[in-house]
Amino acid sequence: MDTFFPTVLTTSIHGSIVILAVLLLRLILKKAPKKTICWLWVLAGIRLLVPVPIESAYSLQPQRVHITLPANLSTVFTVIWIVLAIAIGVYSVCSYIHL
């Protein structure tokens, strides 16, 4: 459980980098087909969902980002993250049922 939150945090940072790249590419590729833009967003979504590092010689992401937190702080953040994820999930299901 001590490695869960740093892994989620690192994946989120890498996902944010990919999202910024997609936003910049959208500005550059204004006349590109909408299908191309959708595929760029699919790549960003895959990066957020896959928690393993994807390395390439042509990557925009840092080679290795290791975030170390004290054990007790990591546990607290992990519990907060799980509680918020469950709360958002319950809210989404309730909103869907209400709709």
Image: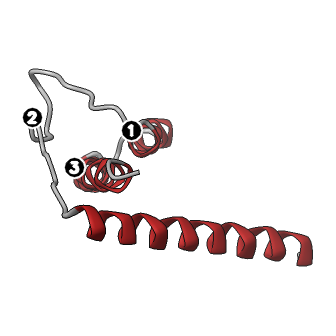
Q: CA gap, disc 1 to disc 3?
A: 29 Å
Residue 76, compared with residue 25, is above or below; it is below
Q: Is residue 46 visible?
A: yes
Q: Is residue 27 above or below residue 54?
A: below
Mark 1 vs 2, N-terminal side: 1
Binning the other alpha carbons within 10 Å of mark 3 as few (below 14), some (14 to 19) or many (20 upward) gives few
Label 2, on which residue? 63
Image location (x, y in percent) of residue 48: 41, 46
Nearer to me, 45 or 4:
4
Q: Nearer the viewer, residue 73 or 95?
A: 73
Which element carries disc 1, helix, strand or loop?
Answer: loop
The residue labelled by disc 3 is: 28
Q: Amino acid at mark 3?
A: Ile
Does residue 18 appear to the left or right of 56 in the view shown?
right
> Are dots 1 and 2 in contact, CB under 8 Å?
no
Image position of 18 with respect to 91: above or below: above
| Residue located 35% across and 56% down the image | 5
Residue 82 rendering spot, x and y as whole percentages: 53, 65
Pick whichever of labels 2 and 3 is earlier in the sequence.
3
* Left or right placement of residue 42 versus residue 16 in this view: right
Amino acid type indicated by mark 2: Gln
Tell me the CA gap for discs 2 and 3. Answer: 26 Å
Three-letter amino acid code at the position of disc 1: Pro
Circle nearer the viewer, 2 or 3:
2
Tags 1 and 3 touching, CB below 8 Å: no
Q: Which residue is mark 1?
A: 51
Which residue is painted at 11% across and 37% down in the image? 64
Q: Quadrant of the C terminus?
A: bottom right
